[in-house]
Image (cartoon, rainbow, N blue to C red):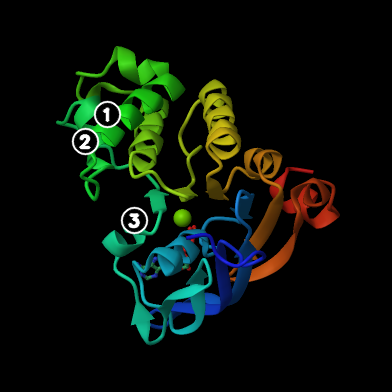
Amino acid sequence: MSAVNGTPHLELTKVSLRYGEVRALEQVSLRVQRGQIVALIGANGAGKSSSLRAITGLRKVAGGEVKLEGRTINSKDRQEPAHALVRQGVAMVPEGRHVFPYMSIKDNLLMGAYTRSDKDGIAADLERVCERFPLLKERFHQQGSSLSGGEQQMVAIGRALMARPKLLLLDEPSLGIAPQVIRLIGRSLREINQADGITIVLVEQNSRMALALSSYAYVLETGHVALEGPSQELMHNDHVRRLYLGG
Ligand SMILES: Nc1ncnc2c1ncn2[C@@H]1O[C@H](COP(=O)(O)OP(=O)(O)O)[C@@H](O)[C@H]1O
Ligand SMILES: [Mg+2]
């Protein structure tokens, strides 16, 4: 089960991705070790979501390769389907959350367990998600549409956890969410990482949040990695401060 020591949990090597003529990613290389929180920051259009699409195989790459635990999952010649990745422990919290408005919170959460058949395990995980986000328990039988943006984000994260992932990918979880709730979500992500040992890739335009939570970060600019390093160092980097932290 466990890979050779030192094999990254996730590795992109010179990944390029296009939408027709648009070159969204140009030779992006990045590496995520098991148990790490790694941030991908950058402006709107920099290629953050495209990087996640390359990882999850939502879009075939034009060059390079994506490896999960040392195994190629996406390259020019190979594209692992999304449901196969879920079984290999990859879960995604998409941008915009995509909570089902006419389903209860409970059913929304259960959607995350669709690849599983271990009833007892699912029930136990549902309980754990409710402990992690007590607010959801209070509203268990309410419809998704009755929730605020922050609460929907909790549902989206909870739903991803219901797949029992080893690697959690999040696309801009702070987008459109009130500052206090962003802090709450940040704390939850740290707990999910530390207590459950889940590796996290955090895509954010909110560089402050992302650098505070992560141990290592990549800065994407127009489809390539402009800068990378330990998050603490990037926080004090002049370029990062000027462009991404408002001075
Ligand atoms: N479906 C698409 N069709 C054409 N161009 C796209 C599509 N999605 C994204 N792009 C373009 O690809 C580039 C990277 O976009 P994206 O990965 O969404 O950036 P980010 O998530 O950092 O905002 C941008 O120039 C964007 O306009
Ligand atoms: Mg995006």
Task: Give the residue type at disc 3.
Answer: Val
Q: Work out which residue is located at the far front of the displayed protein and give it.
A: 1
Q: Callout 1: helix, strand or loop?
A: helix
Between residues 185 and 227, which one lies in front from this camera angle? 185
Q: Quadrant of residue 119?
A: top left
Q: Which residue is mark 2?
A: 119
Locate residue 190, reporting x and y percent: 60, 34
Report the image quarter containing ligand 1. bottom left
Total residue callouts: 3
Residue in view at x 49 percent, y 65 percent: 51
Q: Which residue is mark 3?
A: 86
Relative placement, left or right, of 185 versus 106 is: right
Q: Work out which residue is located at the far left of the displayed protein and give it.
A: 102
User: Of circles 3 and 2, which is in front?
Assistant: 2
User: Of circles 3 and 1, which is in front?
Assistant: 1
Q: CA distance from mark 1 to mark 2?
A: 6 Å
Between residues 105 and 2, which one lies in front from this camera angle? 2
Asked whether disc 3 touches disc 2, contact meaning CB atoms under 8 Å apart, the reply is no
Q: Which mark is residue 123?
A: 1
Residue in view at x 35 percent, y 61 percent: 85
Q: Callout 2: helix, strand or loop?
A: helix
User: Badge 2: few (under 14), some or many (20 or more) residues near its Cα, within 10 Å?
Assistant: few
Task: Give the residue type at disc 1.
Answer: Ala
Disc nearer the start of the sequence (3/2): 3
Locate residue 145, reporting x and y percent: 23, 27
Asked whether disc 1 touches disc 2, contact meaning CB atoms under 8 Å apart, the reply is yes
Between residues 214 and 181, which one lies in front from this camera angle? 214
Vertical arrangement, residue 185 with respect to residue 232, above or below:
above
Residue in view at x 53 percent, y 56 percent: 44
Locate residue 57, reporting x and y percent: 36, 69
Q: CA distance from mark 3 to mark 2?
A: 17 Å
Does the beta carbon of the residue at mark 3 sit less than 8 Å from ligand 2? no
